Image: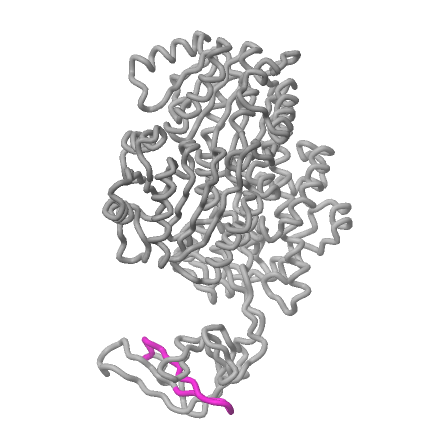
Amino acid sequence: MKSEGELKLGDSVTHIKGVGKKRAQLLEKMNIRTVEDLLYLFPRKYEDRRRAVTIMEAPFNEDVLLEVRVVTKQLGGNPYSKKRVLRVLAEDNTGSVEILFFNGKYLSEYFKPGLSLTLFGKISLNNGRRQMAHPEFHVTGDKDDIRGLFPVYPLTEGLYQGQMRSMQLAVRQTAQQIKEWLPESIVRENNLCDPAYAIENIHFPIAKRPVLESRFRLVFEELLILQSGLFYIKWDRERTYKGVSVGRGISVKPFLHMLPFTLTEGQMKAFGQIERDMERDRPMNRLVQGDVGSGKTAVAELAMYKTVKSGFQAVMMAPTELLAKQHLATLKGHFEPLGINVKLLSGSTRAKERSEILEALEGGSIDILVGTHAVIQPDVKFNNLGLVITDEQHRFGVNQRSLLAQKGENPNILVMTATPIPRTLAVILYGDLDISVIDTLPAGRKPIRTFLRYRDSRKKIYDFVEAQVKEGRQAYVVAPLIGESENIDCKSAEEIYEELCKAYPALRIGLVHGGMKQQDKDAVMESFAEGAIDVLVSTVVIEVGIDVGNATVMVIENCERFGLAQLHQLRGRVGRSGHQSFCILICGTDSETARKRNEIMCSTEDGFVIAEEDLKLRGPGEIFGTRQHGLPELNIADLVKNADMVEKVKDVARRLIEEDPELEMPEHAELKKRVKKMFGDKIQLRL
């Protein structure tokens, strides 16, 4: 145990007064091992307890500060029980409030009539009586008064705000050991405050302005560490690996002339960027973002054509067997007339056929392999792999793209996603990739008409579905649950399937959900694709799935239970032909959040606009699962709220890495140390 003045930034948390083995284990769960780690655990918000309100003006169910006098107290329940309810009646000049402590026996002697208290908590109304359950309290004027701006920290189970505030207080003076570590030019150009000042004021605020100055500094430096690490990874790869130079002098015009459609301006722009990457002597690492139906696959085909005509092989990995088979059918139709051999490898490929494919692949007679996770198995070997394509990248774990890339000698990598990601977030999530955006849709596509309806309209909605089927069209019905739930008030897929079968016996209705075996799901969806099923009732397993141009209606039950980006993906299952398509959202609530989301869905089909709004409502972690993407955990920066700063810091980091790629200059030593700490094993910076 050390006194406050003896503590050092690198000391273990066990040196802090009041931190024993048990609390140190709880801190370890939060990756807090040292005094410095503790100082860099930042508050997520502040409670403003500076101004007391009167009992009668205090709003209900919001944290308030009260100054009251104790009038009476009553200890209820069995006198021999340890758990007894303590009721304290307190008042000010405007009214009274009842304070409840449900295990209050040990507090009974504390609340004496006439005692002046300061309370902090929420007031609720119960049978016309104002009540406050388990508030924080202190004797008014006491040195431990609860007034001021109080930080609220992220915690783990077993730790409490009071304990965390006490620990921060115990290490407060240690913050003065943090010296300026950013180059003077960056500090000056960006008007950054001193880091010790920032740490002091973020934990012990006395006014709003110092907190804002401190927050700006800490967000800036965290984003700079993140961006510098991403730029280093990119620079190191470009420097270290000589790539597959593909297609210099090879024209894709023969392939374009053979296609039954003309590529859009957006597709040609994206391919132009891909082509430039492929012709260089370093590996391409490019993300192609395109809204649902924008034609990413056609762009990928151009890259495959150029690769194969240069004497190399290509592989495309899809998240499901059904999607892989769909890609196979498209690629075979376009490539086999040109003498390009395309094969499929999946988990269900029979042993004899699999063995033949592996032999042909290693021998070089297969030009393009399409498959699922099966293509990254150790025994899958290529003769001369030049291009790796992953479709719907967010469906794969963070290591699977690199496992596939290791099948060749630094092949070109193309990542495709139909999940629109706002550019500011994309540069972080895919910081090691260059980004292309296909922002135009193929000609002849009609806008999908989107409508919001409520439960009382269900009969009319399904009558409309029946009418569309009679005109020769097909429909999807999506539900949030597989089966009925006692806890959640919403329609399940099984329930809807049974209802529709009973109410519309003339319709051929199918059911597919995540609880079914993969081959059973594929069989139902293939029947739908072939037109043998009129209405497909489903959970979100069809979010990324089959391309059925004849499907023109998407009904989404309990739409409030889906994210905006997910609703947009589901809507994208229709509108894939010249027929007018419809998306009908059935909402089970009239909440303000649901109303906002539904308005966005009905007002735009722009996936990037929808993604921006989804980020504002839910945040990046919840939507994309930042751990899945390998994105380092951030302590204070918010990629949505601080989007304006992301671009600014990106420019600073780029200049810094261009000037000193390995961060070897003395003025970059601390930045190098912090980059290594943030990225861990993901980055190999030479010390």
Give the vertical position of 230 relative to 484 (above or below). above
Q: Height in image: 76 above or below 218?
A: below
Residue 505 percent coordinates (x, y): 24, 43
Q: Position of residue 424 (x, y in %)?
A: 61, 43
Regarding residue 686, the answer to whether it shows in the image is no
| Quadrant of image for the C terminus | top right
Q: Residue at (66%, 61%) from the top-left corner?
A: 212
Q: Quadrant of residue 81?
A: bottom left
Left or right of 144 on screen, residue 105: left
Q: Is residue 97 magenta?
A: yes
Q: Height in image: 657 above or below 278? A: below
Residue 614 part of the magenta segment: no
Q: Residue 530's image quarter?
A: top left
- Residue at figure coordinates x 34%, y 33% from the top left: 528
**Residue sitting nearer the eye, 29 or 306:** 306
The span picked out in magenta is: 89-105
Q: So how many labels did they put on this image? A: 0
Please report the residue visible at 59 percent of the width from the left and 32 percent of the height from the top.
Answer: 433
Q: How is the image coloured?
A: one colour
- Is residue 442 depicted above or below 464 in this figure? above
Residue beneath the point at 22% across and 81% down: 80
Left or right: residue 164 versus residue 264 is: left
Viewer-side residue, 224 vs 22 = 224
Task: Give the percent coordinates (x, y) of residue 510.
Answer: 29, 38
Classify residue 541 as left or right of residue 617. left
Percent coordinates x, y for residue 580 in the rendering: 48, 40
Is residue 230 in view from this perspective?
yes
